[in-house]
Structure formats: C-alpha cells, structure tokens
Image (spheres, grey):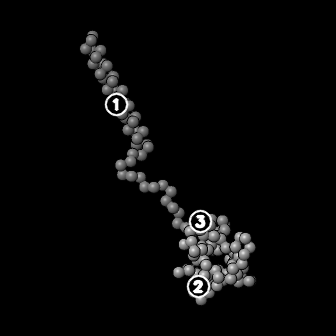
Amino acid sequence: MNAWPDAARPGEPADTARAWHWLARLDDGGQAPMPMGWNAAARQWFAWDGTALAPAEAARRFRYLGPALTPIEVAAEAAQAEPAETTPPIPADMVLRRDAIRNHLLIFVGSVVATLFVAEKIVQWRG
C-alpha cells in the first residue's frame, strides 16, 4: 500500500498548498524518508537535486509520510500538546532527601549520646 492521502489523487499530497512533504521509497522498504518539494502550479514533485517527478510516477515509486513541518509549527504543536510529566512518580521504597537528612541527623545524635553514656560508665568503673 502506497498510503497516499487521497485515493482519487494518487501521487499528490494532502495539502497541495504546502511546499515540502516527507516521502519514502518503496524499493527500500521506506528505510530512508526524504523531504520532497511539491510544485502546486506544475503539479509535480521535485527532489533536492532538481529532478522533477509526475504524480503518477511518485505514486508508483514512493509512499507518502506527511507534511514537512517548519520549526515554528513543531514548537506550536509541542505547546498545544499535553505537558509531559516532568518528574516520574517516586517509588514506594525510596526515601525523600529531607527524610534521609533527618534520619542521618537522628542516627548521629543517637551515636553521640550512646558514646557519651558508654564513656561515662567507663569513667565511673575506673574511678
């Protein structure tokens, strides 16, 4: 299947007013998509090297992938899209940083208190 947008007009893009579109060669299985220009006045495709291609020939040799968007159009689509979640959910077994700091401080204080307690017992035992 060539996947051209309109079966009544094989070899022509969906939006004939747009100048650039993505096409893929059928002979290589669409492995290397390439931008091709569309000349609406002449109703023909042209490649980067200037060769022209009639719509019937394009329908036979290429598969239509879609319009080639400009950077401004890509940015506008990204702005309209749902915002992606920027931070992944926290795993249930993960300790938050503030809790980890609190735990380490409590362990440190407990260690100091236990060391002082043992030191006091040693001093009392010797004295």
Mark 2 or mark 1, which is nearer to you?
A: 2
Against 119, residue 20 (above or below) is below
Crowd class of label 2 (few under 14; some 14 to 19; many from 20; radius 10 Å)? few
Depth check: 81 or 16 in front?
Answer: 16
Q: CA distance from mark 3 to mark 1?
A: 52 Å
Residue visible at 57% across and 86% down in the picture: 7
Q: Residue furthest top?
A: 127
Residue 66 shows up from this direction: no
Q: Which residue is mark 1?
A: 110
User: SS class of the residue under badge 2?
Assistant: loop
Residue visible at 59% across and 73% down in the picture: 24
The residue type indicated by label 3 comes to Ala
Against 113, residue 123 (above or below) is above
Residue 79: give its label.
3
The residue type indicated by label 2 comes to Asp
Q: CA distance from mark 2 to mark 3?
A: 29 Å
Q: CA distance from mark 2 to mark 1?
A: 76 Å
Residue 6: give its label.
2
Q: Earlier in the sequence, mark 2 or mark 1?
A: 2
User: SS class of the residue under badge 3?
Assistant: helix
Q: Position of residue 112 (x, y in %)?
A: 36, 26
> Where is residue 74, by image quadrant?
bottom right
User: SS class of the residue under badge 1?
Assistant: helix
Q: Earlier in the sequence, mark 3 or mark 1?
A: 3
Mark 3 or mark 1, which is nearer to you?
A: 3
Residue 119 shows up from this direction: yes
| Relative to 87, 26 lies left or right | right
Residue visible at 33% across and 24% down in the picture: 115
